[in-house]
Image: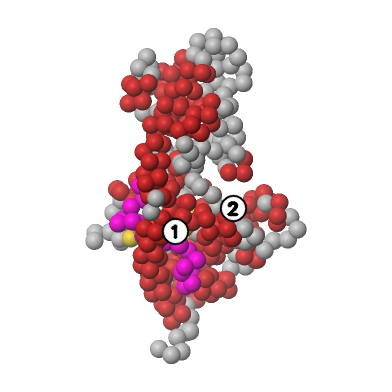
Amino acid sequence: MSDDKIILTGIRPTGSLHIGHFCGALQNNVFIQNTYDYKYMYGMIADAQALTDNFDNPDKVRNNVIEVALDMLAVGYDPEKTILFIQSEIPELTELTFYYMNLVTVARLQRNPTVKSEIEQKEKFSTGLPVGFLNYPISQAADITAFKATIVPGGDDQAPMIEQTNEIVHKFNSIYADVLKPVKIITPDSNHAARLPGIDGNAKMGKSLNNCIYLKDSADTIASRVQSMFTDPNHLRIQDPGNTKDNPVFIYLSVFAKPEHFAAFMPEYKDYSELAAHYERGGLGDVKVKKFLNNVLQETLRPIREKRELLARDSASIMEILRIGTNKARAAAAETLSEVKKAMKLDYFN
Ligand code: TRP
């Protein structure tokens, strides 16, 4: 093996995945899986982390483990290449977390920008913050270091987690022994990722905002979601000039519409920039553009949905994939834990 990169990706199972996840992370992770040189690539379903803000809803997390696994496999995660596993089935991660907790101050956790903004947004934490939630960056450091991951693909919101992980790595290595590996975040490039707004134009697509198109949505649901999309509110008559910049219909087209979609459904335009230019100068109606977007999304999502439906018929074999992956991941984490404990002089009976 020419390369010793170890790549770890993680997803919280709090809901089915939508096209925002697809564009923001999934597609990029599959690209990495299929093109990078690496020693191991892991895909973790972070159910224990999901519980840090859903501890009162165990059914939600439990049920979404299989949902998320189906979504991951449907978009191209390949269990031959990516070790898929369930976080809570690896108790070594909890044990590592416990030791790392000595290396981080409460103030440092409270300063973590991602944690800080999540706390502010969560109504249920207004009366008190659970220790487990504040602690989740440490648990994420355990996830990353347990597998000696050198690369974590992620968006800007994950950068503070990686920074915090590296602080723990350096502190651990300088106090005990050189056991843990520093990690780099790779933020996806624009060819393989984009940030999608919701269908209502809200900057973020999110389940609680009810502005998503899900990977498992039926053809009819996709059509009616596209129909109801927010566009440019000042584009009242077809001849009016339109705004494509803050217009989710155009943002989605800029991401999803490929040359073959133009050839098949919109042959009067060569590409996105011609279509957008026409809308901006006036004379192109929303109905026509939405119809095109519907065709593009149907073509893009149909193969994913069909694969997902096929996989969902045999959930036992999905659980088997997760079981096999979890066993492999657990062996790797156990090895790191034993090195960590040895470095900390916690190896009495060896
Ligand atoms: N925090 C990540 C998210 O919210 C999920 C996650 C947990 C993760 N552990 C990880 C991601 C380790 C990368 C590596 O999406």
Asked whether mark 1 lies closer than 8 Å to ligand 1, one says yes
Whether tag 1 and tag 2 are in contact, CB under 8 A, the answer is no
Q: Is residue 194 magenta?
A: no
Picture quarter with the N terminus:
bottom left
Q: Quadrant of residue 334?
A: bottom left
Give the residue drawn at x 24%, y 59%.
2
Picture quarter with the C terminus:
bottom left
User: For this view, does 132 lie left or right of residue 326?
Assistant: right
Give the residue drawn at x 49%, y 26%.
250
Asked whether mark 2 lies closer than 8 Å to ligand 1, one says yes
The residue type indicated by label 1 comes to Met
From this view, report whether residue 288 is shown above or below residue 56. above
Which mark, by number, is residue 4? none
Please indicate, yes or no, whether residue 148 appears anywhere in the rendered image.
no
From this view, report whether residue 55 is shown above or below residue 154. below
Counting from the top left corner in percent of width and height, residue 230 is at 58, 27
Q: Is residue 76 magenta?
A: yes
Please indicate, yes or no, whether residue 339 appears anywhere in the rendered image.
yes
Name of the residue lying farthest toward the front: 313
The residue type indicated by label 2 comes to Thr
Write down the residue under mark 2.
114
Of tags 1 and 2, the one toward the viewer is 1
Give the residue drawn at x 50%, y 10%.
283
User: For this view, does 198 lie left or right of residue 176?
Assistant: right
Which mark, by number, is residue 44? 1
- Cα–Cα gap, marks 1 and 2: 20 Å
Counting from the top left corner in percent of width and height, residue 330 is at 40, 70
From this view, report whether residue 337 is shown above or below residue 167. below
